[in-house]
Amino acid sequence: MFESLSEKLEGIFKKLKGRGVLNEENVHAALKEIRMALLEADVNFKVVRDFIEDVRVRAVGKEVLDSITPGQQVVKIVHDRLVELMGGTSSLIKFGAKIPAPIMLVGLQGCGKTTTAAKLARLLSKDKRVYLVSADVYRPAAMDQLAVLGRQISAGVFDAGELRDPVRICANAVEQARREGYEVVIIDTAGRLHIDDQLMDELRRIKDQVHPAEILYVADAMTGQDAVNVGSTFNERIGIDGVIMTKMDGDARGGAALSLKAVVGKPLKFVGIGEKIDALEVFHPERMASRILGMGDIVSLVEKAQAAIDEKEARRMAESLRKKDFTLEDFRNQLAQVRKMGSMKDILGMVPGMGKMKALKGMEPDESELVKITAIIDSMTKKERSNYLIIDGRRRKRIALGSGTTVQDVNRLLKNYVEIRKMMKKMNQKGGIRAMMRNFPF
Ligand SMILES: Nc1nc2c(ncn2[C@@H]2O[C@H](COP(=O)(O)OP(=O)(O)OP(=O)(O)O)[C@@H](O)[C@H]2O)c(=O)[nH]1
Ligand SMILES: [Mg+2]
């Protein structure tokens, strides 16, 4: 899996490595090759198109950090974009409040539902009591297959007895699980060669009966883009919460795994990497991207270079925060930096001793809040910005009008500003930080 894509990308980046600057031309040439490599890996063509465009925008004209080469910078951009493409962070199962939480596995015939049900039961049983039930009444040996697997991992398995209705079986199994104190019920459903109305209808009825905490679509990596398209259909017809991709250990080219999130809109949560019962892993976009690129060292190098620059900037700001009288003008400038760099908490956290302060919680304004605050300060006169005390009711009304906000917004901003200013002042006094810390329980 991904070996061939990995190899190709490595070759492309090697060529870029020697270049001194990134320009439209050499980025263009590299992107063309990356595009081919992704298409050959069976990534959905629309996904490839957006991916390439995005990397282009990010790469061209990007200021290259001192300590790294442009080629390394591109590796990092491609890496970050790959991580995003696969959903950013790992998504775990959301069990919800109901106990037991039913987890329903759906998918086409032979994709690995039954095997995955047992693997998942094993994985989850590390901290939950897991019960298994087979709703496959069509294939004669299906229920036995699950029962055998269940015994291997000592999970409880529902015995359907004479029951022949999948909906009834699931309902009874959940009821039984509740009585026996199980926390999770994994429902293995029947597969069909193709999506048909009967299958969808049956799944729908099971869903309406047991209200699963999650419905996971089991996709066979070997079927490539078909797995992605079928996933879209399952999502449209019954609604899925995530995907488990099986047979990632095979020689599939990997494009399906890369296209899923963008096409279906649901995250890949687990991957099956073998026939054995322990061959199921939580899917980590970050690790997968590093594996595909095979260049973890470069990625972390660029990250370090970036962190160093941010840290330098943050220290400078922390220093100036301490020295100056903190005017609204300063406040606005700091906010501009914050918007560029991250949260106020991170920056104040650089001031010795302040990192642990509880008061810093809730000081992480969201982007729209920052835009609003900046607009309000922009609507003030220079005089008002250097002396907030002159901002009376009349001025507040004018500022609100000018910034498209309300007087309440202006009031709140000034109140917050006064609080922050007070903190700054205290820090300026000798021994100030320590004195101030005494007032904060932590
Ligand atoms: N190599 C490999 N084989 C797998 C993986 N997951 C499942 N299989 C194999 O795929 C085959 C089908 O698996 P099942 O679990 O029976 O598939 P299913 O979706 O339940 O099939 P139906 O119930 O007939 O629809 C079995 O031979 C499994 O061993 C995997 O991650 N890697
Ligand atoms: Mg099965």
Image: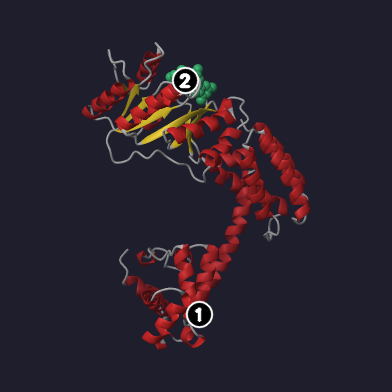
Residue neighbourhood size for the residue with mark 2, other residues' Cα within 10 Å, grouped as few (<14), some (14–19), many (≥20)? some
For the residues labelled 2 and 1, the Cα–Cα distance comes to: 66 Å
Q: Which residue is mark 1?
A: 329
Residue at x 50%, y 19% (from the top left corner): 193
Point out the image quarter for the C terminus. bottom left
Secondary structure at numbered mark 2: loop
Q: Which colour assignment does the render follow?
A: secondary structure
Residue neighbourhood size for the residue with mark 1, other residues' Cα within 10 Å, grouped as few (<14), some (14–19), many (≥20)? some
Seen in the image, is 242 located left or right of residue 442? right
Res. 383 in view: yes
Res. 349 in view: no
Q: Is residue 274 above or below residue 64?
A: above
Q: Nearer the viewer, residue 221 or 410?
A: 410
Horizontal and vertical percent position of residue 31: 72, 46
Residue at x 50%, y 85% (from the top left corner): 381
Horizontal and vertical percent position of residue 178: 24, 30
Horizontal and vertical percent position of residue 440: 32, 69
Residue at x 56%, y 28% (from the top left corner): 221
Q: Is residue 408 above or below residue 149?
A: below
Q: Which residue is mark 2?
A: 192
Quadrant position of residue 64: bottom right
Quadrant position of residue 341: bottom right
Residue at x 45%, y 86% (from the top left corner): 387
Q: Looking at the picture, which amino acid does disc 1 mark?
A: Glu
Secondary structure at numbered mark 1: helix
Q: Nearer the viewer, mark 2 or mark 1?
A: 2
Horizontal and vertical percent position of residue 107: 46, 26
Point out the image quarter for the N terminus. top right
